[in-house]
């Protein structure tokens, strides 16, 4: 079978006699197989290219010594000038110790490079932002991962970057790393697993509630998983009007509530303890009980289609909303949740309807923060970004199978950049004051330029198309494994 290299119709690649479950498993295997082969073919995803021209060899004397001395002394006299005279103003460090890589756990420091390069690629193509993958060893002399090592590393590198994107750091270390660095650094430090997931989940939830004709303050909400993502999702939902008395959060040991002495006694779990203090006042112990009559389930838990039980979904309220966002396999297949009565089902995957994916958020919010040279990204900026995405999606039209903008909708990134930048200005964390139109125009121009550059490189053969045999082999292995 000849495969369209755009991969637009994945469902059409598989045998007609495959069940929905077989198709879902085969898609996952195909994408994994293809990823491994394509990374081998290209040798990774990112490279470094100049942004300034070389019009003759004397230009090296301009870009380097002796001319560059003027740049060095200008920045020495005013460090903020570095944002204008170097690429710092559009450069993000993607920092990870690779201790919680997607659904694969601790992959060792270099094991996270594929994901961190992927973030850098998405930032450039979707947001017009340059990024560098930096995977570090956070183990101390006792062999345990030490959050202070990441904190010190970021403090030292902050002078070369306009922002830092933290990624795939295991909890509870991730909480301390983010909270300490947000206060210690003079540039935005953003934890995409936590804040990015929370932002885009809130955006999808706003529109799902709109379609279900429900209000966030009235909704009964169950969150399965209490890691960095779901604890931050809970915090943003409550900050945006959710009722803590109607929220129940579950970790691997049960529900969070004031009786959880194991959480109270561990200072590293302060973010979870905050939710113990605020939510589940009735101390509902079992998820099966919490799910009865619930309006919303947000699962960021163990990957696998049986983590969320069909009967739990069946017991939910009318027009129930289910976000099953574990990667790479959701906690329940969307078709199964629909069969049990769910009105709207979202996952973290682009091969199902309603992808709730950080990629719709982080390129835009970071671009907006960079353009006004923000000193931090606040919760207010994240909530504004969520509403920006939701508003954009509503204007172009939403329905139960299409609640949120996708990565293909270029304008969403420029608009959220402008909204976030204005929020930063209003909160007093921006170094410069730009209008909404100025940010929108610059962001749109940078995004268009990044996409055009990639497309030109593909057209001119500097980026070669993967051979058909590579795609066919990946597909054949997936089909054979599932049969």
Image (tube, helix red, strand yellow):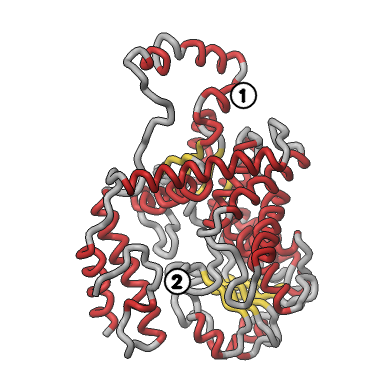
Above or below, 197 against 352 in this view is above
Quarter of the image where one finds residue 196: bottom right
Identify which residue is drawn at 53% across, 36% down.
90
Above or below, 240 against 433 in this view is below
Q: Which residue is mark 2?
A: 351
Q: Residue 373, image x and y in percent?
A: 63, 34
Foreground: 372 or 197? 372
Identify which residue is drawn at 51% across, 59% down.
408
Q: Residue furthest top?
A: 66
Does residue 390 appear left or right of residue 92 in this picture? right
Please rate how many residues cluster around mark 1, counting C-alpha atoms within 10 Å: few if below 14, some from 14 to 19, many from 20: some
* Disc number placed over residue 80 in the picture, else none: 1
In this view of the protein, can residue 132 be seen by the observer? Answer: yes
Q: Quadrant of the N terminus?
A: bottom left
Quarter of the image where one finds residue 104: bottom left
Q: Residue 92, image x and y in percent?
A: 51, 39
Does residue 179 appear left or right of residue 144 in this picture? right
Q: Residue 100, image x and y in percent?
A: 45, 58
Contact? badges 1 and 2 (CB < 8 Å): no
Identify which residue is drawn at 51% across, 42% down.
129
Q: Which type of secondary structure does the marked residue at label 1 adopt?
A: helix
Label 1 or label 2, whichever comes before in sequence order: 1
Foreground: 352 or 291? 352
Above or below, 93 against 54 in this view is below
Identify which residue is drawn at 77% across, 41% down.
427
Q: Quadrant of the C terminus?
A: bottom left
Q: Which type of secondary structure does the marked residue at label 2 adopt?
A: loop
Gap in Å between the C-alphas at discs 1 and 2? Answer: 43 Å
Please rate how many residues cluster around mark 2, counting C-alpha atoms within 10 Å: few if below 14, some from 14 to 19, many from 20: some
Foreground: 274 or 361? 361
């Amino acid at each position: 079978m000849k495969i369209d290299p755009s991969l637009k119709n994945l469902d059409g690649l598989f045998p007609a006699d495959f069940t929905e479950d077989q198709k879902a498993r085969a898609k996952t295997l195909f994408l994994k197989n293809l990823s491994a082969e394509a990374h081998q073919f290209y040798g990774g995803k990112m490279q470094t290219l100049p942004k300034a021209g070389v019009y003759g060899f004397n230009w090296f004397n301009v870009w380097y010594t002796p001319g560059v001395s003027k740049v060095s002394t200008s920045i020495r006299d005013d460090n903020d000038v570095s944002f204008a005279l170097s690429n710092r103003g559009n450069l993000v460090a993607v920092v990870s110790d690779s201790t919680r890589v997607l659904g694969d756990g601790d992959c060792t420091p270099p094991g996270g490079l594929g994901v961190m390069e992927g973030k850098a690629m998405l930032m450039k193509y979707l947001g017009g932002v340059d990024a560098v993958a930096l995977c570090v060893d956070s183990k101390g002399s006792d062999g345990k991962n030490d959050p202070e090592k990441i904190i010190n590393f970021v403090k030292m590198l902050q002078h070369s970057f306009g922002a830092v994107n933290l990624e795939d750091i295991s909890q509870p270390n991730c909480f301390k790393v983010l909270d300490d660095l947000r206060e210690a650094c003079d540039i935005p430090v953003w934890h995409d697993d936590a804040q990015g997931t929370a932002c885009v989940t809130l955006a999808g939830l706003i529109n799902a509630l709109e379609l279900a004709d429900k209000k966030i303050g009235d909704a009964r909400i169950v969150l399965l998983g209490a890691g960095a993502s779901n604890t931050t999702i809970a915090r943003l939902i409550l900050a945006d009007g959710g009722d803590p008395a109607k929220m129940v959060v579950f970790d691997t040991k049960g529900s969070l509530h004031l009786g959880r002495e194991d959480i109270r006694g561990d200072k590293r779990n302060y973010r979870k303890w905050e939710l113990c203090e605020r939510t589940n006042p009735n101390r509902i112990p079992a998820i099966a009980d919490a799910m009865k009559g619930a309006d919303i389930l947000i699962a960021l838990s163990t990957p696998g289609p049986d983590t969320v039980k069909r009967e739990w979904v069946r017991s939910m309220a009318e027009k129930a909303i289910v976000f099953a966002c574990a990667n790479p396999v959701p906690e329940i297949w969307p078709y199964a949740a629909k069969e049990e009565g769910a009105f709207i089902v979202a996952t973290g995957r682009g091969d199902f309807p309603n992808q709730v994916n950080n990629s719709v958020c982080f390129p835009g919010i970071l671009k907006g923060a960079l353009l006004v040279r923000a000193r931090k990204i606040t919760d207010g900026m994240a909530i504004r970004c969520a509403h920006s995405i939701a508003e954009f999606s509503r204007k172009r039209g939403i329905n139960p199978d299409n609640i949120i903008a996708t990565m293909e909708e270029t304008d969403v990134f420029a608009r959220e950049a402008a909204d976030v930048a204005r929020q930063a200005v209003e909160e007093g964390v921006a170094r410069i004051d730009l209008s909404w139109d100025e940010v929108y125009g610059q962001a749109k121009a940078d995004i268009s330029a990044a996409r055009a550059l990639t497309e030109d490189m593909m057209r001119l053969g500097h980026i070669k198309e993967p051979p058909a045999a590579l795609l066919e082999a990946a597909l054949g292995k997936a089909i054979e494994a599932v049969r």
